[in-house]
Amino acid sequence: MRAPLYSVVIPTYNRLESLLKVMYGLATQSCSSALFEAVVVSDGSTDGTVARLQSATFPFRVIVLEQANAGPAAARNLGVAKAKGSLIIFLDDDVVPAADFILEHARSHHDRTDTVVIGPMLPAPDPTSPWVDWETAILEKQYRHVESGVWDATARQFFTGNASVQRRRVLAAGGFDTSLRRSEDVELAFRLQKLGVRFVFNRRAAGTHIAERSFESWLKSAYQYGRNDIAIGYRRKRRDLLESVAAEFHQRHALTRLLVWAGLKSRWVRRSAVSRMSRLVIGAAFKLRLRGLARYACSGVFNLFYWFGISDELGSADAGLSLIRSDPSAAPAIVGHALASRAAPPTFQSPPDVSVVVCTRDRPESLKNALASILLHFPEGSELIVVDQGRDDSVSSIIEDLAAPEGLVRYVRCRRLGLSGARNDGASHAANPVLVFTDDDCIVGPDWVNAWKGAFTAPGTAVMGFGEVATAQHDPAQGFIPGFELVPGLYGPELFKKGIGAVGMGANMAVRRDAWEALGGFDESLGSGRKLAAAEDTDFAFRAVRAGYLVMHTGATPVVHHGFRPKGEASRLVAGYMGGIAAMYLKHARCGDGFAVELFLREGAGLFRNVLLRLASRQRPLGARSLAAYLRVGMASMRLPIDTRLRVFASLRIGTAS
């Protein structure tokens, strides 16, 4: 018997009545029944599903499989494993296929092996409940947006109630994650996306969704979707998923946003009471034929329980509120901070692999030299990530010209503002446990990467380190190059009492990735490219020591800085730096940190004293501009909102530096 071209995989659990409607829908397909088979997997059904199917006769081949209840992910994996067709069409046991269903799925894959086809699940003529009515209306809205080009078809729309993909692609991606009982289809879709597939929508590959579910199971699904979106985004390092979770909240109706905010904010809210009350309101509106009101109420309560799930996965309602308040681009840092352990990290037993991150903006020639010095002695297992914020494609051309093995150098295009945003972008793409940063105008020593690897195997709880930054030869009469000298050792809060210049310089810095996540990443309102144009590296070190960690200074990893600044820029650059320092300390002071208050006053007093001493000796008060910036920028930063949990500025829309 000739093997079928297409395998329709249907997991089922105690839905015999609707399953039979699905099977009869397959029996009336417009294509030849010899072209396809149905693989039905009973996931521990107790309603006689297996016996009924085995006794029935269908015009197409039917494979009936049975397993102990393990969830739809495990059932689909078993179905795919036993399928004979090269194209897998996933269909739910309550989605009745239209006559051209298989033909249209097959047509969308014609001559393409890199396609995932999404078909619509159309509403039944008479909805069984207002929440099912709302659900089908939301799906139809998504379909219209995809068809009109408002949205692209993406992994987020991959629902295995009606979708198709090449069998070998599913196997290459590793199949469905059986630990998930919800969102297992979207999670697989993100892995398929990594394999280079494209998602398309075909309205004609339709099925009618005869959904029946209780109000309680509907709310439970909303809650579980929230938990799973966070878990999948964090575990699979799907920055885009986490950002979309936060961004989509701001696209909701104002009343829905208000309901979610109030539900997370109010400690007295009992979820069971909310469930009972909302069911009464929705049911009453539906019976009174106030369909629009019922749908609005469904949207509100679904989103509320979705965010209950998010907050529970993050560990607190405060974490959920942080996600709501902040810019979507901060979502990965917020989630990482909430989920990563704050305990002292384990010591590496052997030198860890590192991810070197170089951020660049419109300096192709200096970047070329920097990359060449890094790759000169680059250890196996390490990776180089180049984050490009430039205005042209010169960096991608430089990387293409590098004589580096494939996959060793990764290019990341960054559209976010500021150096901190670029560093966070690079860190979020990193695969290794230690992140090492340098600038695009630095030349590293021949054993620089290996030296950083060895530094993190030393005893102690240091989660970040700074190395020496030497300055290239230059004429001091013409200008200057910033550098950093150090005394090797492990430091806690006492490091900051030595003065801000004693902390470290981001041009030669390393951070454990687990600490970067736990501390919420670099504060993207600080650093070059932002109006608070400095102190992002110092701020991260301060948050580390205030969390109980130590900061390492090592002399084994020097770099040479070639970033020459003309003499006339010195006063402006130092003033900008001191303004960033003031904003940083006052931010921590507003979080209730008395040590930050002490340091703010100490730095300000030092600046004031220097100005007075120069005036007393009838010299030009060179520090006056820095003192003015320290006070002016510091006071201006008090108006910016902050996230006290992460100790970062909550607003990422401060603008670029002039």
Image: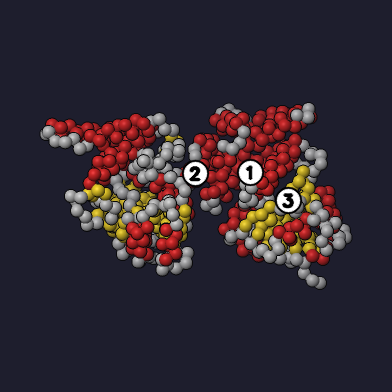
Q: Which residue is drawn at 71% across and 34% down?
A: 295
Which residue is labeled 1 in the image? Answer: 224
Question: Given the image, on which type of amino acid does mark 3 rest?
Answer: Arg
In the displayed structure image, the side of residue 355 where residue 564 appears, left or right = left
Q: Which of 100 and 507 is in front in this view?
A: 100
Q: Which residue is drawn at 72% across and 32% down?
A: 292
* Spatial separation of the CA atoms under disc 2 and disc 3: 33 Å
Residue 587: % across, % down: 38, 35
- Please tell me in which quadrant of the rendered image residue 351 appears: bottom left
Which residue is labeled 3 in the image? Answer: 203
* Spatial separation of the CA atoms under disc 1 and disc 3: 28 Å
* Spatial separation of the CA atoms under disc 2 and disc 1: 23 Å
Q: Which residue lies furthest to the left in this view?
A: 617
Which residue is labeled 2 in the image? Answer: 329
Please state, as top left, top right, bottom left or bottom right, where the N terminus lies in the image. bottom right
Mark 2 or mark 1: which comes first in sequence? Answer: 1
Q: Is residue 328 visible?
A: yes
In the displayed structure image, the side of residue 126 where residue 595 appears, left or right = left
Residue 349: % across, % down: 40, 60
Q: Check disc 2 and report its element: helix, strand or loop.
A: helix
Question: Given the image, on which type of amino acid does mark 2 rest?
Answer: Ser
Residue 86: % across, % down: 71, 65
Q: Which of 73 and 395 is in front in this view?
A: 395
